[in-house]
């Protein structure tokens, strides 16, 4: 998803998640997605407990159980494939890192955080060598967010 760089506040999960856990998990009420703030990634229902135990955070049951109790009744996508797609140029989603990237002017669905990737794309697909276009003629600098690392933008 492509996003604006506006960091202003939006609706939060204030009423859903206890203040104790708000620095760890965030529930995006617009898209019904649960986000792990320290990891900057989305959590799906499959692997949720694992993420807080052996997976990443090594929390004990008495630590993660009350936290997950705040959210298990909510709609959470089962797996990454079920994540909603998000239209471009929304406010940044809370809890997800923002990456500087590039977007192809000819095919807006092509976005990447790799400068070589955009140069290769423009040269291979549009037959414009990177020495033949000035910055911004064939690409735009954009701010990007992804629901999860390695996911699409
Ligand atoms: Zn995490
Ligand atoms: Zn293109």
Image: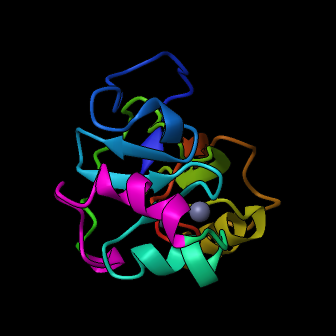
Residue reaching furthest to the top: 8
Q: Nearer the viewer, residue 147 or 64?
A: 64
| Rendered residue at 35%/75% (across/down) | 80
Is residue 99 visible to us here? Answer: yes
> Is 47 displayed left or right of 75 in the figure?
right
Q: In this figure, what is the number of numbered marks?
A: 0
The question of residue 33 being in magenta is answered with no
> Is 7 displayed left or right of 39 in the figure?
left
Instruction: Give coordinates of residue 120: x percent, y percent.
Output: 69, 74
Q: Quadrant of residue 107?
A: bottom left
Instruction: Give coordinates of residue 85: x percent, y percent.
Output: 27, 58
> Is 90 displayed left or right of 104 in the figure?
left
Q: Quadrant of residue 10?
A: top left
Q: Nearer the viewer, residue 134 or 67?
A: 67
Q: Nearer the viewer, residue 101 or 126?
A: 101
Residue reaching furthest to the front: 62
Q: How is the image coloured?
A: rainbow
Is 146 situated above or below 144?
below
Is residue 138 visible to us here? Answer: no
- Ligand 1, by image quadrant, is bottom right
| Rendered residue at 23%/39% (across/down) | 30
Residue reaching furthest to the right: 131
Instruction: Give coordinates of residue 71: x percent, y percent.
Output: 29, 53
> Is 68 displayed left or right of 132 in the figure?
left
Q: Nearer the viewer, residue 118 or 146?
A: 146
| Rendered residue at 17%/57% (across/down) | 73
The question of residue 65 being in magenta is answered with yes
Query: From which residue to which does the magenta span run?
Result: 61-81
Q: Quadrant of residue 34?
A: bottom left
| Rendered residue at 44%/39% (across/down) | 93
């Amino acid at each position: 998803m492509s996003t604006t760089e506006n960091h202003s506040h939006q609706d939060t999960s204030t009423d859903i998640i206890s203040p104790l856990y708000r620095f760890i998990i965030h529930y995006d009420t617009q898209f019904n997605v649960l986000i792990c703030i320290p990891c900057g990634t989305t959590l799906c229902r499959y692997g949720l407990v694992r993420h807080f135990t052996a997976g990443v955070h090594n929390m004990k049951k008495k630590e993660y159980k009350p936290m997950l109790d705040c959210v298990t009744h909510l709609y959470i996508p089962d797996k990454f494939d079920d994540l909603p797609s998000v239209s471009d140029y929304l406010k940044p989603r809370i809890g997800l890192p923002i990456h500087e990237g590039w977007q192809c002017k000819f095919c807006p669905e092509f976005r990447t955080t790799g400068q070589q990737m955009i140069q290769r794309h423009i040269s291979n697909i549009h037959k414009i060598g990177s020495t033949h276009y000035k910055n911004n003629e064939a690409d735009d600098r954009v701010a990007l967010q992804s629901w999860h690392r390695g996911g699409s933008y």
